[in-house]
Each structure stands twice: as C-alpha cells, then as structure tokens.
Image (tube, helix red, strand yellow):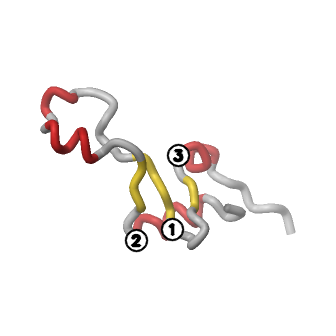
Amino acid sequence: MPKMKTKSGAKKRFRLTSSGKVKAPAAFLSHNLRRRSQKMKRQSRGTMILNECDARIVRRFLPYA
C-alpha cells in the first residue's frame, strides 16, 4: 500500500495535543480589524482547541499526526 498524503495546508495550520485534541489559531484576525470589538481581538490571541466535529475533519487531513 502507498503512504497516505498529508494535506500540506493543514500541517501548517494545526497541531495535535498529547491527548489528541486539535489546536488551531483563532480566525478573523488578518484584516478589517476596525469592525471587531476589542474584547474579540483580545480573546482571539494565541491558539484555541477546535470543536470535535471540526477536529474530526482536520484529523483526516493529518493521518500521521
């Protein structure tokens, strides 16, 4: 059997924790920031744990993570 390919866009954007959860940077922080509240911008710093239904999709993109 050939090896499965990892989605190269996903390997740049997501990391798996030791318990198997998917860490991702917060979205909506690249432009149009004048429309976003200061609270939203402050809480979106750093990374977040993805929801389980989204994490299932990401894990399929990263077969060897």
Q: Where is residue 42 in the image (x, y as percent from the top left)?
A: 25, 41
Kindly report which numbered mark, 3 or 2, lies closer to the viewer in this rendering: 3
Packing grade of label 2 (10 A; few <14, some 14-19, many >=20) is few
- Which quadrant: the C terminus? bottom right
Q: How crowded is mark 3: few (under 14 residues within 10 Å), some or many (20 or more)?
A: few
Q: Residue at x 28, y 27 (%)?
A: 31
**In the rendered image, which quarter contains the N terminus?**
bottom right
Residue 11 to residue 23: above or below: above
* Contact between labelled residues 2 and 3, with CB atoms less than 8 Å apart: no
Kindly state the secondary structure of the residue where label 1 is placed.
loop
Which amino acid does the dot numbered 3 rest on?
Answer: Arg
For the residues labelled 1 and 3, the Cα–Cα distance comes to 14 Å
Query: Of circles 1 and 3, which is in front?
Result: 1
Residue at x-position 45% and y-position 52%: 24
Marker disc for residue 53: 2
Residue type pointed to by label 2: Cys
Residue 19 coordinates in the image, percent (x, y): 57, 72
What's the residue at 30%, 45% (across, down)? Answer: 44
CA separation, marks 1 and 2?
Answer: 11 Å
Q: Closer to the observer: label 1 or label 2?
A: 1
| Element carrying mark 2 | helix
Mark 3 — residue?
Answer: 13
Q: Residue at the location (61% across, 68% down)?
A: 18
Instruction: Using residue 12 as the reference point, say whether residue 65 is left or right of it.
Output: right
Element marked by disc 3: helix
* Residue placed most toward the observer, 43 or 12: 43
Whichever of labels 1 and 2 marks the residue nearer the N terminus, that label is 1
Q: Which amino acid does label 1 sit on?
A: Lys
Distance between mark 3 and mark 2 Cα atoms? 17 Å
Nearer-N-terminus badge (1/3): 3
Q: Which mark is residue 21?
A: 1
Tally of numbered discs: 3
